């Protein structure tokens, strides 16, 4: 992905984190001011519906995005501004949309924010499932907190976002790099509801950033020091044994890629994919 678009506070904060990498062009959209160069300031609106109706013509704003390019659109649940999402994405249907949805801890949301989350959470998944998006990547802040192991109150979300941004960036880099060895293949057309996870190679432990159910496929990315790849005679067997174990235990379509890095420590990521909408569709009302 070359273009990152962040909507609302959560989306803007994560999109801004990608700015440290030169591979991306960052766009931020919010009703609050921001110092990012491609920031679009929208007038604040009281409801989801008002935000959707207020989206202007963005052809000039997105003029540098080429037809057919990949975009990562980032939005969080709960905020009224998420009502802009579909109106904005309608103007980007010429592109390959990958949507990153950040689900807040719903146990802490008030009634209005909870309803907004339900609306966007359900609709986005249906859009992905029907092929309007290339995929949706679901991330649950409660699961991300478990992976991080907690963080101070000051800088809490920065700590969570740092882990998420690093994982997404590295998987994107690997997807555009030549692996040393790989069984990775194009995912099933129906497996568009996804999440990302961290893999501890030494312990063969994986931690997904969303409790995805009805998983059909998992793709693993092994990042290993180049010298280790040349000298470790047991590594390949370790990886293949891990893959065989997962196939037997999980009864899924499993694939993997091994990539050379300059880092001393081995690390890994995975993408889990499902064709099923997560959670139950519920009745909604204007919020």
Image (cartoon, rainbow, N blue to C red):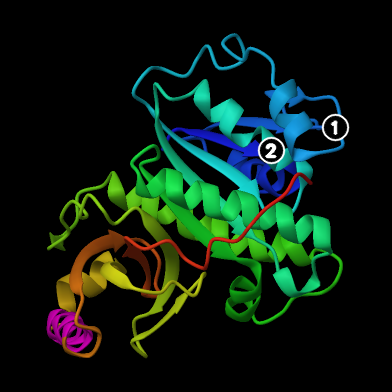
* Crowd around label 1: few <14 · some 14–19 · many ≥20 (10 Å): some
Q: Which mark is residue 45?
A: 1
Residue 2 coordinates in the image, percent (x, y): 44, 33
Q: Please tell me how many numbered marks the rendered image carries.
A: 2
Position of residue 71 in the picture relative to residue 57 (left or right) = left
Label 1 SS: loop
Q: Is residue 183 visible?
A: yes
Proximity of marks 2 and 1: CB atoms separated by less than 8 Å = yes
Label 2 SS: helix
* Crowd around label 2: few <14 · some 14–19 · many ≥20 (10 Å): many
Q: Which residues make up the magenta segment?
A: 234-247
Residue 213 coordinates in the image, percent (x, y): 40, 74
Quarter occupied by residue 111: bottom right
Residue 237 belongs to the span the image colors magenta: yes
Which residue is pictured at 58% across the width and 55% down the height?
Answer: 121
Q: Nearer the viewer, residue 245 or 88?
A: 88
Residue 12 coordinates in the image, percent (x, y): 70, 41
Which residue is pictured at 84% across the width and 64% down the height?
Answer: 110
Residue 159 position (above or below residue 61): below
For the residues labelled 2 and 1, the Cα–Cα distance comes to 10 Å
Residue 125 coordinates in the image, percent (x, y): 47, 52
Give the labeled residue for mark 2: 83
Residue 126 belongs to the span the image colors magenta: no
Q: Is residue 169 visible?
A: no
Position of residue 72 in the picture relative to residue 199 (left or right) = right
């Amino acid at each position: 992905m070359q273009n990152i678009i962040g909507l609302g506070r959560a989306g803007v904060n994560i999109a801004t984190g990608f700015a440290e990498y030169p591979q991306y062009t960052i766009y931020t959209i919010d009703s609050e001011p921001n110092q990012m160069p491609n920031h679009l300031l929208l007038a604040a609106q009281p409801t989801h519906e008002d935000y959707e109706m207020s989206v202007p013509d963005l052809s000039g704003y997105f003029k540098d995005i080429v037809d057919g390019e990949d975009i990562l659109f980032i939005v969080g649940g709960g905020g009224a501004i998420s009502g802009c999402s579909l109106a904005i994405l309608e103007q980007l249907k010429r592109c390959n949309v990958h949507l990153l949805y950040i689900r807040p801890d719903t146990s802490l949301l008030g009634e209005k924010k909870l309803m907004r989350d339900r609306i966007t959470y359900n609709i986005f998944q249906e859009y992905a499932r029907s092929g309007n998006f290339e995929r949706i990547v679901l991330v649950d802040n409660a699961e991300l907190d478990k992976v991080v192991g907690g963080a101070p109150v000051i800088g809490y979300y920065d700590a969570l976002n740092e882990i998420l941004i690093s994982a997404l960036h590295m998987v994107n880099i690997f997807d555009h790099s030549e692996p040393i060895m790989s069984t990775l293949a194009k995912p099933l057309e129906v497996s568009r509801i996804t999440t990302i996870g961290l893999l501890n190679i030494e312990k063969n432990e994986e931690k997904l950033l969303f409790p995805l159910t009805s998983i059909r496929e998992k793709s693993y990315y092994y990042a290993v020091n180049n010298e280790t790849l040349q000298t470790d005679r047991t590594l390949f067997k370790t990886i293949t044994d891990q893959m065989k174990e997962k196939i037997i235990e999980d009864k899924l379509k499993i694939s993997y890629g091994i990539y050379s890095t300059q880092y001393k420590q081995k690390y890994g990521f995975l993408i889990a994919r499902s064709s099923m909408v997560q959670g139950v569709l519920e009745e909604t009302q204007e919020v």
